[in-house]
Amino acid sequence: MFVFEIRTMKRILAKSTLREFWEKHPDSEQYLKTWYDTAMNSNWKTSNDVKVSYANASILKNSRIVFNIKGNTYRLIVKFNFDHGMAFIRFIGTHSEYDKIDQIIFN
């Protein structure tokens, strides 16, 4: 007998952060909605699983991953709790805003 565990992302906190961003940057809306839908329907269990879907994503320490949005125009940092199927939006901004932050502060 085979048992398959299919686990999708249960919750992304907070979609409102993404919505507020795309209202200020309308050209990011479709890209962020696609990222959100992909993440919600994923069965990622590790950072490496994310890399299969997003080869250009950068894995940081503490279960954080940087996603390039709209061809690297924008950056999205997400902290994952893979055991509980949760993702936490830690930063969304332009590439130049991202260059000014220190990713260490997002522990």
Image (cartoon, rainbow, N blue to C red):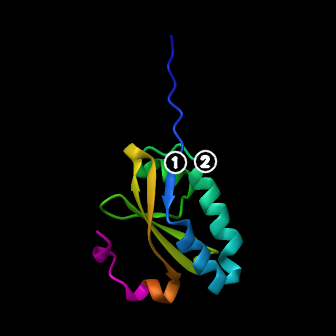
- 107 displayed left or right of 5: left
Q: Which mark is residue 76?
A: none
Q: Which mark is residue 41?
A: 2
Do the residues bearing badges 2 and 1 touch, measured as CB atoms within 8 Å? yes
Magenta stretch, main secondary structure class: helix
- Give the secondary structure at mark 1: loop
* Residue 24: percent from left, percent from top: 63, 86
Can you tell which quarter of the image residue 63 is in? Answer: bottom left
**Is residue 4 rendered magenta in the image?**
no
The residues colored magenta run: 99-107
Image: 43 above or below 19: above
- 72 displayed left or right of 85: right
Labels 2 and 1: the sequence-earlier one: 1
- Give the secondary structure at mark 2: loop
Could you tell me which residue is drawn at 67 percent across and 62 percent down? Answer: 34
* Quadrant of the drawing holding the C terminus: bottom left
Residue that badge 1 annotates:
9
Image: 6 above or below 64: above
- 17 displayed left or right of 34: left
Task: Give the residue type that dot 1 points to.
Answer: Met
